[in-house]
Amino acid sequence: MITTGILSGCASGSKENPKDDFTWQVDRFDDVKVLKYQVPGFETLNPDQKILIYYLSQAALCGRDILYDQNFKYNLPIRRTLEAVYINYEGDRAAEEFKALEKYLKKIWFANGIHHHYSMDKFIPEFSEQYFDNVVNSIPEDKLPLDFGKKDHLLAVIKPAMFDPELYKKRVCLDSDKDMIVNSAMNYYEEGITQTEVEEFYGKMVTDDDLTPVSYGLNSKLVKDNGQLVERKWKLCGMYSQTIDKILFWLNKALPYAENEVQKKTIQQLISYYKSGDLKTFDEYSVTWVKDTVSEVDFVNGFIEVYGDPLGYKASWEAIVNFKNIEATKRTETISEWAQWFEDNSPIDNKFKKKEVKGVSAKVITVATLGGDYFPPTPIGINLPNSDWIRRDHGSKSVTIENITHAYSQASKGDGFADEFVLREDDKERMEKYGSLADNLHTDLHECLGHGSGVLAPGVKGDELKNYGSTLEEARADLFALYYLADPKMVEIGLIPNLDVAKAEYAKYMMNGLMTQLTRIQPGKNVEESHMRNRKLIAEWCYEKGLADNVIEKIVENGKTYIVVNDFDKLRGLFADLLREVQRIKSEGDFDAGKKLVESYGVKVDPELHNEVMERYAKLDLAPYSGFINPILHPVQGDDGKIIDVVIEYQNSFTEQMLHYSENFSYLPSKN
């Protein structure tokens, strides 16, 4: 066996078959718990598939520094300085301030920077500037990142960013009353560039007669050169070239192990895109990737999602490597087979329905490695590509990540949440019996059909909704899933045993949207994150519109507020009404109506209810956020030196994995 930077942590169970007493949680700090996930079925793959996963996984780990730099321009020197202290400090490591420094570093590792991954607010250290000066000055200078000059110059750069609460306070600002570019700390635009300049720069690129526009701005940083706006492309021999070169090394290693010619072409096109930075090549790659519905192993690697840009132009770097869960995929294949029926019977206006649903593919996957913006916080479902015209002409690919949802479920067993927040016993019983199935089907419908449904009106480009676009798109997909989860067709085609599955999801969704997700908001803050805004928008709108019929009720018992659904059928009707309007807003690019909907229902927080929820949640001692560490893939070498197999090990230390990644997959300078 050969190893490439293998960690020294203990395995839980055998390397390929974790025991029943698998330890799901490996760390807990602040508002976060860090979990492990299992990779069932990995040992049944053939050796070439395992080797393909190994090489793709190495590529998935290489881009970590890109995301740090994208999130904030000083993330890398801050992280590296703290890591140098953590590794080399010889003082009192039991001191409270050192423990606070360790917690701050863990929060940065988890969020890929100094801003919270959900709220986008900057973390403020719980140790003093003086203490920080002392510990940094105790570290040999050659152990520190010195891209900014000597130690005193380094501290002069990073200390204000860390300790000044008014400086770089928000990674992504979605306040439409402010200049969202100037007031966001993300590093997609050079400081000093305004929102108006960005909108004018990219607004000129898209023309009404271009039916297949590229995603302008997706893979570049916008800067000024002699007063003129120009793009610094993220590509080989461009910005982030040092890391992209390593990604290309591993993608080229993976090529000979491609399962078929389509997958081989996909990897080749991705390599070409990384080399050229040409967005037309990216679209060609995306089309080929969508058409690959045969390969058992699959992956995403690149600049994809735009949640980190308040204007939705720039994409964060992300990666995932996975293989198909063949048995569970039967569920999503059934959904795909009925995609045209779902589209035809959608409650939206007929003129916004797809006349012919093309290329809708969906599968349940087992993830083997997570990277970039998928790690450590991890999605449970993905639908790509994002380009509207590719969806229209070629379709989309959707996945539900079932080993991640399983890990969430296992880690939350017996946590007391349902007893504290669910009032009615019949709701508890339905959630206990059908909750897992309901969650997975909601994700399936959301990703496979929700995001893939509907069409834009002629002349609508797709970027008209600006900072509200992500929230409204997530709302559209959620509403589609919620509406159809309670359709008798779901029973008819064998996806659910009865409509109690929908009732379980409806009760939980309304409780979460109206109340329990508030645990993720700091006191006095509004809702900022797009997915949270989406859930709040749907729940608050349905609550208000259903007041006359008491569809949803807020009940107070023993000083505790509970959310209960009294009429599931009427709630489904409300979902239909809101879906119809949200689809109209997207299809027509109605910015004003979209803004009004989000600002009216998705942003403001009731402070009294918020305080109550926080107090009740605190008594349960639960962490509202979860993320993961990756398993370790060990390549096995044959007598001739070639890799002949790969075995999997489950490690137990978040800190060891993060330090390992920083040592072995960190290629960018601290100053980019």
Image (tube, rainbow, N blue to C red):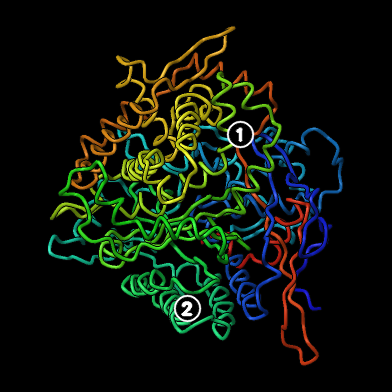
On residue 263, which mark appears? Answer: 2
Q: Nearer the viewer, residue 302 or 551?
A: 551
Which quadrant of the figure has residue 660?
Answer: bottom right
Under mark 2, the amino acid is Gln
Query: Is 421 above or below relative to 326?
Result: above
Query: Is 47 above or below relative to 600?
Result: below
Horizontal side of 369 relative to 450 (left or right) equals right
* N-term-proximal mark, 2 vs 1: 2
Report if residue 153 is visible in the image: no
Horizontal side of 230 relative to 327 (left or right) equals left
Report if residue 322 is visible in the image: yes
Of circles 2 and 1, the one toward us is 1
Q: Nearer the viewer, residue 534 or 420?
A: 420
User: Exactly how many numbered labels are in the figure?
Assistant: 2
Task: Give the image location of residue 445, x and y in percent.
Answer: 41, 49
Crowd band around label 2 with a 10 angstrom C-alpha radius: few (<14), some (14–19), many (20+): many
Q: Regarding mark 1 in the picture, which secondary structure is present there?
A: helix
Q: Mark 1 points at which residue?
A: 432
Horizontal side of 135 relative to 48 (left or right) equals right
On residue 373, which mark appears? Answer: none
Which residue is located at x 17 percent, y 53 percent? 460
Which residue is located at x 59 percent, y 29 percent? 429
Q: Which of 260 and 462 is in front in this view?
A: 260
Task: Give the image location of residue 88, x and y in percent.
Answer: 81, 53
